[in-house]
Image (cartoon, coloured by chain):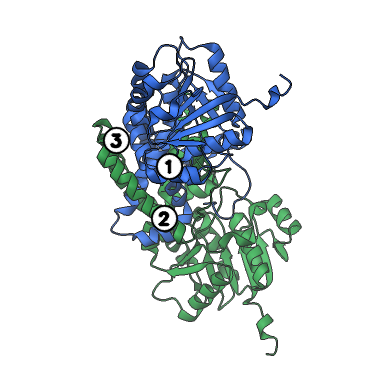
Chain colours: A green, B blue
Amino acid sequence: MANSAKQPMFGKVALIGLGLIGSSLSLAMRRGGLAGFISGYAQSAETRKTAVDLGLVDEIHTNASEAVKDADLVVLCVPVGVCGAVTAEISDSLKQGAILTDVASTKGSVVRDMVPHVPAGVHFIPGHPIAGSEKSGPKAGYAELFDNRGCILTPDENADPVMTDKLEAFWRACGSYVDRMDAAHHDMVLAITSHLPHLIAYSIVMTASHLEEVTESEVIKFSAGGFRDFTRIAASDPTMWRDVFLNNKEAVLEMLGRFSEDLSALQKAIRHQDGDMLFDLFTRSRDIRRGIVEAGQDTDEPDFGRLS
Amino acid sequence: MANSAKQPMFGKVALIGLGLIGSSLSLAMRRGGLAGFISGYAQSAETRKTAVDLGLVDEIHTNASEAVKDADLVVLCVPVGVCGAVTAEISDSLKQGAILTDVASTKGSVVRDMVPHVPAGVHFIPGHPIAGSEKSGPKAGYAELFDNRGCILTPDENADPVMTDKLEAFWRACGSYVDRMDAAHHDMVLAITSHLPHLIAYSIVMTASHLEEVTESEVIKFSAGGFRDFTRIAASDPTMWRDVFLNNKEAVLEMLGRFSEDLSALQKAIRHQDGDMLFDLFTRSRDIRRGIVEAGQDTDEPDFGRLS
């Protein structure tokens, strides 16, 4: 017990999927000494090679079942749409008493797809680190990705409190602050803070690329006026985002409906030259921005390369 | 002629308005040695004091007519909506042969409002540097604001080519690349690259702040998922943006109509679970992003503080 401070939090951790999140999680675990041993699985041979070359894993596997054997913590870092299938595949190989979690951006669908395949004696606690980048793949990862970012856990009423606390401590050790809520509420929160913004960004890029009057090169050249900031989030991983929209459909459509109403109100104010309404709204928007800067979720520094 | 290289481009420059753009222009002129003398006008006493304290001007005036006397170049750095009134006010004080320009985000309305007040013998050449920030006011300015950003000039068919070339050389010396186009085309280009993105950003902030199911503190806490990037542009100067929408109404409503159609198509794809359509669109969005990064309008570096 003399050197208990040096004991890792988990003896063996299996990372299923080694894209941006999986690779960043490996680097965050290495930084904090959180895992005694990291095994990994990735579908593509190229990703597996990169993961080994970068030292992201101590052992790489060509099948997920092999990777999870004897693991104390198994983290699915795969697109939302395949979480169920992957769980079915690894189900028989999961160790009794292990914690199984995920990092998917939707939680209702993941619970629906995964729970039927979780064996008794394995602790499934859904999770979602609110961190990412427009970059994807194992080379995009970095240890600081989760620092000062939220991570949401959505344990159900049967979840073992000790195991939930342990997973929460793990994410805190990766740099995140952790909140717990139910899966349905998570899906609403993310629909407005993440899914709808991405959908809108994709949509305006679509609009800009279809114009006859304005060329694509003009759009690119003068993008510093605001458009640029939308393209950054519209450059995110296409597979991940397709799956998000298909799997959080109700909440996204609900938020989209409200957004469309608000946009129509603005449209009407412009058409009717209602300057007072526009001025009031634009003034109130600054308060929300101030809240975000004060909460440390963005910097207030002038950013010469980025400001629009 | 021996020290002609040290001659400033303009003997006296008058900056009418000393907010973000006016103050940055002063600093860019100082950096490049472009003005022999800078006179300034600002409506508010506080701004005038700040401009003097920061050394932005060699002489400050409480009325715009005084500031433009003997100036070889007069730059209106005021909101779109007051360009006409300010021109009427300074009209009698403008020097024969002077260049009069502006920095407003809409050009059709500015031409309409200013031209009737421009005296014969004064060269009015409308301009628009595509650079800005969510910060406003004289303290927000910095010399590099225009570096590697576009500046659009919209001289009409009567403009003196020598004077237009001179103004173009001035903006290049401030760090910008310069394009020329007609005012109507400018207003279309900016409607899609800047005005519509701002309108959408304001709209989604409005939607997020009206939800009953998700609290404002949750929106702020989990904004790193994408919402944050929208709030940055939605924190821009309210007066400026009100005027932009009121004065580029037709082009903004036109682009908004097309955006709404594209958003409806995405909505339909989500409702009908059309994953292929979503995947194809999301993949194509990456190409536009690549164009922007390659054109030097944004950086490709991972940005720990900002990535969504």
Name the residue that disc number 2 marks. A290
How far is mark 2 from mark 3, CA to CA? 26 Å
- Tag in front: 2 or 3: 2
Q: Decide which of A148, A241 is in the foreground and name it.
A: A148
* Rendered residue at 46%/10% (across/down): B157
Q: Amino acid at mark 1?
A: Arg
Q: Position of residue B293 (x, y in %)?
A: 60, 37
* Rendered residue at 76%/56% (across/down): A53
Residue A130, compared with residue A93, is above or below; it is above
| Residue A69 visible in the displayed image | no
Q: Dot 2: what SS?
A: helix
Chain on which label 3 sits: A
Name the residue that disc number 3 marks. A267
Chain on which label 2 sits: A
Q: Is residue A180 left or right of residue B171?
A: left
- Tag in front: 2 or 1: 1
How far is mark 1 from mark 3, CA to CA? 36 Å
* Residues at discs 2 and 1 in contact (Cβ within 8 Å): no
| Mark 2 or mark 3: whose residue is earlier in sequence | 3
Q: Amino acid at mark 3?
A: Gln
Residue A230, compared with residue A38, is above or below; it is above
**Disc number placed over residue B48 in the picture, else none:** 1
* Residues at discs 1 and 3 in contact (Cβ within 8 Å): no
Q: Quadrant of the N terminus of chain B?
A: top right
Q: Dot 3: what SS?
A: helix
- Tag in front: 1 or 3: 1
| Residue A200 visible in the displayed image | yes
